[in-house]
Amino acid sequence: TEIDVPGVMVFDEGTPWEKTLRDAEPHEEMKMSMREVLVHSSNLGTYILAERLGSRGLYKYLRAFGFGDTTALDFPGETRGIIDRPSEWQGTEKVTVTYGYHYSTSAFQLVAAVNAVANGGMYVEPRLLDRLHQVADVLVHPGHHRGVAGPRRRMREIAAVAEVGGQVDAE
C-alpha cells in the first residue's frame, strides 16, 4: 500500500498558530510505501499513516508500547516519561506527536519499545540480569509479556527498514 505524501503541509492555516511543516528531504508530492516513509524518515508520511489511528488510537499504541509508565525494573530514579492525553494536545502537537515530539521517554522505555518491534509485536518487560543460566542451549526467562502490535509479518517489515534495502522473508 502506498500513500500520497506532500513535500509541505500547512496546519491551522489563517490562525495565529499557523505552522508549515516539511520533510527533512525536500520533495514534491510523491507516493511512498510504509517502508519508504520509515527509510526516508518522512515526518509528513508518518503523520498521514498515524492519522488513520486518530489521536486516541495513537495514544493507546504509545501507552501499549510502554511510554508513560515505568518498566517492571523498579530501577532507582527511573521516570515514567511524559505523555499528555490527546485531549491536551493543541495545535500542531496533534501532528508532531506522530513522529516523536511532545512526549519524553526513558532509555528503558525506548529499548523496550524497539524490543517489541523486534519480537513481532510482543512486549517483553525489560530485565537487568546479574548472570545468565543456560539450559539445553535455550535461555528461558519468565516474565511479563503482552502483544502490542501485529501481525508478525508487519513487525518484521518495520524491523527490516533498519537495514536500507532489507528484505522481508516471504510467508
Image (cartoon, helix red, strand yellow):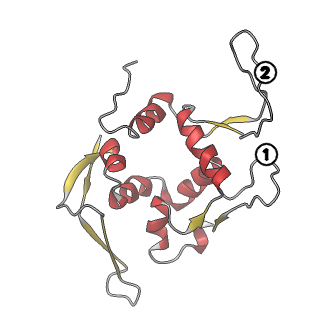
Task: Name which residue type carries label 2.
Answer: His
Left or right: where 144 falls relative to 85: right
Outermost residue toward the left? 28
Numbered disc 1: secondary structure: loop
Q: Is residue 117 above or below residue 93?
A: above
Q: Is residue 135 above or below residue 8?
A: above
Instruction: Give percent across and percent down for residue 128.
Output: 76, 40
Instruction: Give percent across and percent down for residue 15.
Output: 37, 88
Instruction: Give percent across and percent down for residue 164.
Output: 32, 39
The nearer-to-camera label among 2 and 1 is 2
**Residue in view at x 48 percent, y 35 percent:** 155
**Residue in view at x 46 percent, y 78 percent:** 91
Numbered disc 2: secondary structure: loop
Disc ID at residue 97: none
Tag count: 2
**Residue in view at x 35 percent, y 54 percent:** 41
Q: Quadrant of the C terminus?
A: top left
**Residue in view at x 34 percent, y 61 percent:** 44
Between 7 and 130, the residue placed more toward the observer is 130
The residue under label 2 is 133
Looking at the rendering, which quadrant does residue 154 occupy? Answer: top left
Instruction: Give percent across and percent down for residue 32.
Output: 26, 48
Task: Name which residue type carries label 1.
Answer: Ala
Disc 2 to disc 1, C-alpha distance: 21 Å
The residue under label 1 is 72
Left or right: where 103 falls relative to 95: right
